[in-house]
Image (tube, helix red, strand yellow):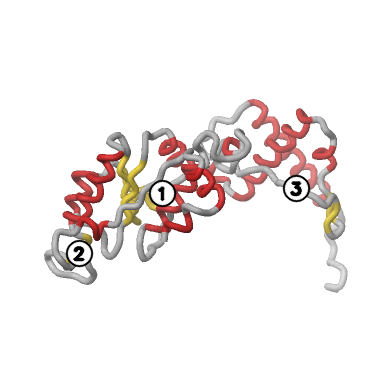
Amino acid sequence: MFQLFFQQGIIGRAVTKQQIDVSVFNIRDFATDKHRVTDDRPYGGGSGMVMKPEPLAGAIRSAKSISPDSKTVLLTPQGRTFDQAAARSYADCEGLILVCGRYEGIDERIDHRFVDDEVSIGDYVLMGGELAAMVIMESVARLIPGVLGAEDSAEKDTFSGNFVEHAHYTRPYVFEGDAVPDILLSGNHGKIDEWRLEMSLIRTFLKRPDLLKGKQLSIQEIDILKKWCADIENIIKAQSSRDTGPLSGCQ
């Protein structure tokens, strides 16, 4: 499952250039019986199977022998929700060991003895942790210096500044009658930056207002929101002053 992921796109290029180093450990290789069993029935009864501790412990120890200072992360629906802040934190780590859960989960003793952190990519359940591992690897890898083409690309992403990213435009200038905002063609980078900040704030307010809660805004950001609120009030006043008789066609 991971082979194509490590060969394609930005991740594949980063692996080729040795900007990141990745290894996959198959827990079946660390099974202790001739049938290479990695799961068993839960003590106390119940449905489903539980991942056995011996193969997991062997795989984690093998990974630790290569990168002793790596953080061990269990991918589980019970973990805290993975976000951009977690990605930045992981990018600063010496390395990551991502443990892909399966079935009903893993033996609790592995969690107690080996796991440093537990994360989930959302409040839903997958067949296994492999897809979640790919999400985290890509999110973290793109924060490693040199992995992205432009050094500031990751810094300007959505969530990197705790705001939704501003709108983007490319050629053609006019698409089905809709033109690119003139400010983006002005060549005035200071004004363009101001426009992008304003668009980012407005989009955050409209799409993800939860991101603004508890955030310490700058004076410039507060002024932008005040101006936008004033514009909205003027629109409301203008609408209120109009004749509010029956709408055309509704008589």
Residue 36 is labelled as 2
At x 17%, y 68%, the residue is 35
Whichever of labels 1 and 3 marks the residue nearer the N terminus, that label is 1
Image position of 78 (left or right of 35) = right
Mark 1 falls on what kind of element?
strand
Residue 127 is labelled as none
**How many residues crowd around disc 2 within 10 Å: few (fewer than 14), some, or many (20 or more)?**
few
Numbered marks: total: 3
At x 86%, y 73%, the residue is 249
At x 81%, y 30%, the residue is 188
| Gap between marks 1 and 3 measured at Cα | 31 Å
Whichever of labels 3 and 2 marks the residue nearer the N terminus, that label is 2
Amino acid type at mark 3: Tyr
At x 71%, y 46%, the residue is 168
Which callout, 2 or 1, points to the residue nearer the camera?
2
Question: Where, quadrant-wise, is the N terminus in this rendering?
Answer: bottom left
Amino acid type at mark 1: Thr
Residue 169 is labelled as 3
Q: Quadrant of residue 186?
A: top right
Q: Is residue 227 above or below residue 99?
A: above
